[in-house]
Image: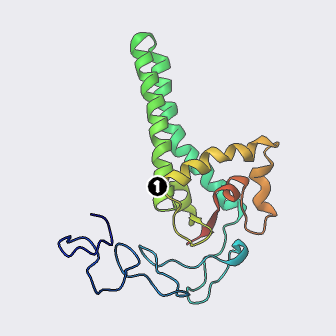
Amino acid sequence: MSFGDPNPNNPYGQQPGQPQQPGYGYPQAPQGVPQQGYGYPTAPPVPGGDYGQQPGYGARPPLSGWWRRVGAILIDGICIGIPYGAIIGIGAGVGGGAGSGILVLGILVGIGLGLFKLYKEGTTGQWIGKKALGISLLREVDGRPLGFGMAFVRYIAHFLDSFACYLGWLWPLWDAKNQTFADKVCSSVVVRVG
């Protein structure tokens, strides 16, 4: 039997005398009525991607300045570099087979801390440097954290910032949204929260 079969013995088919239904699941909304999506309601996108106040959703936090961003990068670099450097230094000092094992451990610690940084920035918008300086990494369209995947893509996209004589790292100095090239690619902004 197939869908819409008038056979009353088919429990899944259309029953006789009932109007044809539009399909499986919940009834369809009438034409011209917007349908609500799944999940939590989100702020509507701003026309043209303008970062500003949206009616009914309150004011967005102000954009972070360039110096705070630089400070956060330096603090995060120190937080990853000190454990990584200490373990690598110990491994180089020990030498031999044990030293090689310690060197590998140092590399794994550096990679692990880098991935943890991306996880925290993706899920909360902050890691140690951003939290210390009161800034947060958010999606431009709705002000929510990027998520780990987009934080990772943003990290990889930072090669664009370095590609043209490091011009992308300086771009926030004169950009209207204080974005690097990686921020533009990933539609992210860094805002002040504290």
At mark 1, the secondary structure is helix
Q: Amino acid at mark 1?
A: Lys
Instruction: Give the farthest residue toward the top.
Output: 96
Q: How is the image coloured?
A: rainbow
Pointer 1 local density, CA inside 10 Å: few below 14, some 14–19, many at least 20 = some
Q: Does 30 sit left or right of 174 as displayed?
A: left
Foreground residue among 9 and 83:
9
Relative vertical location of residue 12 with respect to residue 85 in this rendering, above or below? below
Q: Which residue is mark 1?
A: 120
Residue 22, image x, y percentages: 41, 78
Across and down, in percent, residue 166 comes to 78, 45
Q: Nearer the viewer, residue 128 or 145?
A: 145
Give the residue drawn at x 71%, y 75%: 50
Q: How many marks?
A: 1
- Name above or below for residue 65 compared with residue 32: above
| Quadrant (top left/top right/bottom left/bottom right) for the C terminus | bottom right
Q: Is residue 73 left or right of residue 34?
A: right
Res. 38 image quadrant: bottom left
Task: Report the side of 177 relative to 187 (left or right).
Answer: right
Residue at the farthest left position: 9
In the rendering, at what x and y percent does residue 172 appear? 75, 60
At horizontal 74% and vertical 47% (from top left) the residue drawn is 161
Q: Residue at x 34, y 74 (%)?
A: 25
Quadrant position of residue 11 = bottom left
Image position, residue 64 (x, y; %): 66, 67
User: Does 149 sit left or right of 23 as displayed?
Assistant: right
Q: Residue at x 31, y 64 (%)?
A: 2
